Image (cartoon, rainbow, N blue to C red):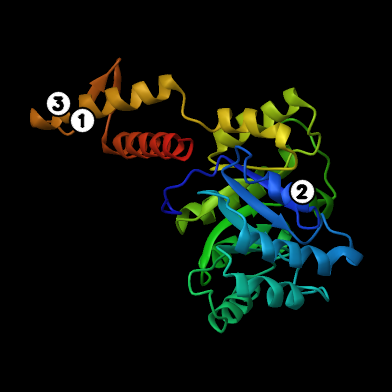
């Protein structure tokens, strides 16, 4: 499946140190996997974890799932060792944490340019610092960039803010991150919901994230997959409306009109662009589940 057309409703973090989890992920209904070498791995397990992830990328079958490897940040002692172990496996994408500016992305892109098996490797950025949010536009425009993941926990910490169901403190960060991603054609994934057994709280964030325009949500636990996939799947009502809008607009065009009226509402070309995108997403989800 073309990476640009695949769904990204659910993107699950898998600790690189847990071999059973790496194997089980082959069968989980997640659209994407983040093999984590950073926060989920203790310092003494870093070397073993990067070896496990490299082996998983080479030997295990994850189907059409998006595969990202989150390395440790460049300010740590582990980043270059992570890359040395992972890049020979030809990863689909590297997720870089603690991004502060485009210079961080450019540094990683330069390393990828000089690596074998990595001509296709893309870069994703963790948008988790105040500087990353303020520099979101230049980060989005940097070489090899394909996506952004909101690091809501780190942002809340750095802002000295408190959380609430409406995520009031993150409103500006979410908006700037999405604006930059959309301006440069990138995928944009919402941050994690920590209370993984709190189904109602997760649903609130899922509804908010989809309302804001995220492509999907990053997750900490497999139990969060089903509600997340459902939340980011176009509903039957949305699909039916999109088809009716396209039919009405086509009829209007054939009659020499530039707009159509459906259910008492104007349907313009911009609505057709949205309708086509929604139907394409529904088709991609259906294809990924066959």
In the rendered image, residue 65, in percent from the top left (x then y), is placed at 55, 48
**According to the image, label 1 marks what residue?**
259
Q: Which mark is residue 20?
A: 2
Looking at the image, tell me whether mark 3 or mark 2 is earlier in sequence order.
Answer: 2
In the rendered image, residue 196, in percent from the top left (x then y), is placed at 78, 34
Q: Which mark is residue 189?
A: none
Q: Label 3: state its secondary structure.
A: helix
Q: Is residue 267 left or right of residue 5?
A: left
Looking at the image, tell me whether mark 2 or mark 1 is earlier in sequence order.
Answer: 2
Q: Quadrant of the C terminus?
A: top left
- Tell which tag, 3 or 1, sits nearer the viewer: 3
201 or 177: which is nearer to us?
A: 201
Identify the residue at the far bottom of this view: 114
**Disc 3/disc 1 C-alpha distance (Å):** 10 Å
Residue at horizontal 63%, vertical 79%?
A: 107
* 104 relative to 61, above or below: below
Identify the residue at the far left of this view: 255
Disc 2 residue crowd, few under 14, some 14–19, many 20+, Cα 10 Å: few
Q: Is residue 278 left or right of residue 45?
A: left
């Amino acid at each position: 499946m073309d990476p640009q057309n695949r769904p990204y409703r659910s993107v699950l973090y898998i600790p690189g140190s847990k071999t059973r989890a790496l194997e089980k992920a082959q069968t989980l209904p997640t659209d994407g996997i983040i093999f984590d070498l950073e926060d989920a791995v203790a310092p003494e397990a870093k070397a073993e974890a990067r070896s496990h992830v490299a082996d998983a990328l080479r030997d295990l079958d994850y189907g059409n799932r998006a595969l990202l490897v989150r390395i440790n940040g460049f300010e740590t002692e582990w980043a270059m060792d992570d890359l040395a172990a992972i890049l020979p496996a030809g990863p689909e994408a590297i997720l870089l944490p603690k991004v502060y500016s485009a210079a961080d992305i450019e540094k990683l892109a330069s390393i990828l340019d000089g690596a074998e098996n990595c001509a296709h490797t893309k870069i994703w950025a963790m948008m988790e610092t105040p500087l990353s949010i303020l520099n979101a536009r230049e980060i989005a425009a940097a070489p090899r960039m394909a996506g952004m993941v909101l690091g809501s926990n780190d942002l809340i910490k750095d802002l000295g803010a408190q959380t609430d169901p409406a995520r009031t403190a993150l409103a500006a960060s979410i908006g700037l991150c999405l604006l930059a991603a959309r301006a440069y054609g990138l995928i944009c994934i919402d941050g994690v919901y920590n209370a993984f057994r709190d189904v109602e709280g997760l649903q609130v964030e899922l509804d908010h994230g989809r309302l804001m325009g995220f492509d999907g949500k990053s997750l900490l636990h497999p139990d969060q997959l089903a509600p997340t996939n459902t939340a980011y799947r176009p509903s039957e009502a949305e699909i039916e409306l999109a088809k009716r809008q396209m039919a009405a607009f086509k009829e209007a065009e054939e009659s020499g009109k530039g707009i159509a009226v459906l259910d008492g509402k104007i349907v313009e070309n911009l609505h057709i662009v949205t309708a086509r995108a929604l139907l394409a997403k529904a088709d991609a989800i259906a294809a990924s589940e066959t």
